[in-house]
Amino acid sequence: MEPSNPAYKDFVKTQFASAPFIQHLGIELIDFAPGWVETRIALRPEHLQQDSFVHAGVIATMADHSSGMAAGTLCPAGRKVLTVEFKINLMRPGTGAALTCRAEVVRPGKTLSVTEARVFNEDGKVIALMTATMALVE
Amino acid sequence: MEPSNPAYKDFVKTQFASAPFIQHLGIELIDFAPGWVETRIALRPEHLQQDSFVHAGVIATMADHSSGMAAGTLCPAGRKVLTVEFKINLMRPGTGAALTCRAEVVRPGKTLSVTEARVFNEDGKVIALMTATMALVE
Amino acid sequence: MEPSNPAYKDFVKTQFASAPFIQHLGIELIDFAPGWVETRIALRPEHLQQDSFVHAGVIATMADHSSGMAAGTLCPAGRKVLTVEFKINLMRPGTGAALTCRAEVVRPGKTLSVTEARVFNEDGKVIALMTATMALVE
Amino acid sequence: MEPSNPAYKDFVKTQFASAPFIQHLGIELIDFAPGWVETRIALRPEHLQQDSFVHAGVIATMADHSSGMAAGTLCPAGRKVLTVEFKINLMRPGTGAALTCRAEVVRPGKTLSVTEARVFNEDGKVIALMTATMALVE
């Protein structure tokens, strides 16, 4: 996939770093290229739910933000990415010291992009699967 | 709808209060009865994304947790609620000082319950719509 | 909700009647007004799946088309409705002689509308719940 | 992935062939192995919607049934597959003489399996993406 914005690297890095909630949770941008993004979160006690698994909201936030940034790698200059909708299947409990996420653009578009993201535990097992629609707005 | 657990009130209050991520974000249980739950979040700077709107992950966390607690009001004693999947449409940007959420059980079940949740801004406008499948596990 | 197209009634009737797959399945437009649509299907043997329940695809088709037409009641003149995405929870098996569906616009928009649809059996019990994003395209 | 039912091939073929709606639409089972299924539909005029694209309901039916059969390849003997929920993103219009679908099990389970399906046009371009939860019921 070809980036339409030659400065897409700066765009993604800046967008990622400037989202307070993502910084607050400690989600890090690990790697990216046109069409995909990889992220990581070191788990903390405040990320858990009542059964000591990672809260679905943390996993969804990670997958949503990674998906938006994947769409962002192909976003035309001057536009921004907003989530229209996403759906997530939570398939295994989130446990361990860290989670990773890989998000990819399945269908890039001018105004809407469709993405898929998978979240993995430290054993490399997929714990969540997200599909999303991202709007590229002026 | 009839609660199958006579102690459902204590169950919901305890479950809600014992989720670290929910306490961390400041999501509060406002009211509930068999089949529904209402919650509130006072917005803070760390809840925002890069465009100063509330991050989709915060909205999704609120709707997911409220949905799980709505299912919890009808959960048999000795079981717990786990999210199987959810889908959320983000329809307006989240802004203002607080958001509220109302989650309802659409289809109660013995092992799976289906819920719907709506998140509102301070003007009473719906900003997000979630449907979810909740597992009631031993 | 206010229709932006004064001829919305003709638009919805014409759009509904001109979809071959809907005619083929026998889905009928029962009633509509700005923001909502009600439809009905008389069930036939060819609508079933391997366990003699209505196939999920029939239920999804009914809910999707009804949702699109609900968005169509508010669609500006000169535009058409296309499904961007939908999610459906199948909560009870589809049985009996007929099913009905009510679809509503939750959030009308200029280019995207969000809808919700519920499908009911003859006992008035909800058997399926759909949320969808509809594009209003030129 | 390992099939738990040694007779899984007969199970899938029988289940596929015994669904009236699938036969009625002309969806064919092309190939399968433990964990995945491939299907095909030759398009007919009655499969279209009002703009002469394939109706979303046809695409959803194909993806849903293929997903159920993918789960069926790993289904224990004596159980059957029922759709709990699915979500589909429609990314390109369905056109041409035929569509194909590949459905895979992302997370096999004892009572719930999560699947992903992609539908392709004759140019090999993905036109739809579905994730689903399938119940394996006695």
Image (tube, coloured by chain):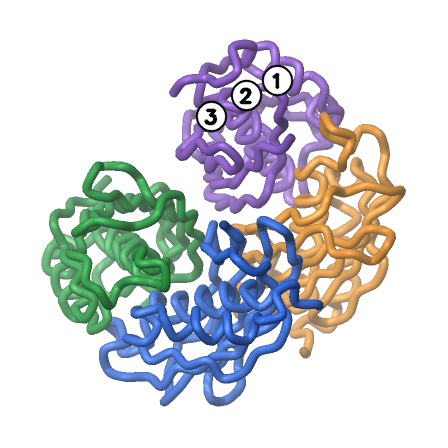
Chain colours: A green, B blue, C orange, D purple
Within 10 Å of disc 3 (Cα), the crowding (few <14, some 14-19, many 20+) is: many
Q: Label 1: chain? A: D
Vertical relation: D115 (above or below) B107: above
What's the residue type where badge 1 is placed?
Glu
Q: Is residue B26 visible?
A: yes
Within 10 Å of disc 1 (Cα), the crowding (few <14, some 14-19, many 20+) is: some
Coordinates of residue D103 in the picture (x, y in percent)? 47, 28
Instruction: Pick the quarter of the image with the C terminus of chain D.
Output: top right
Q: Secondary structure at mark 1?
A: strand
The answer to whether the residues at label 2 and label 1 have Cβ atoms under 8 Å apart is yes
**As drawn, is D91 to the left or to the right of A116?**
right
> Residue at the spot x=41%, y=25% of the render?
D124
Q: Secondary structure at mark 2?
A: strand
Coordinates of residue A131 in the picture (x, y in percent)? 40, 48
In this figure, what is the number of numbered marks?
Answer: 3
Residue denoted by label 2 = D39
Q: Nearer the viewer, residue D90 or C4?
A: D90
What's the residue type where badge 2 is placed?
Thr
Mark 2 and mark 1: span between their CA atoms?
5 Å
Q: Secondary structure at mark 3?
A: strand
Within 10 Å of disc 2 (Cα), the crowding (few <14, some 14-19, many 20+) is: many
What's the residue type where badge 3 is placed?
Arg
Q: Which mark is residue D28?
A: 1
Q: Label 2: chain? A: D
Q: Which mark is residue D102?
A: 3
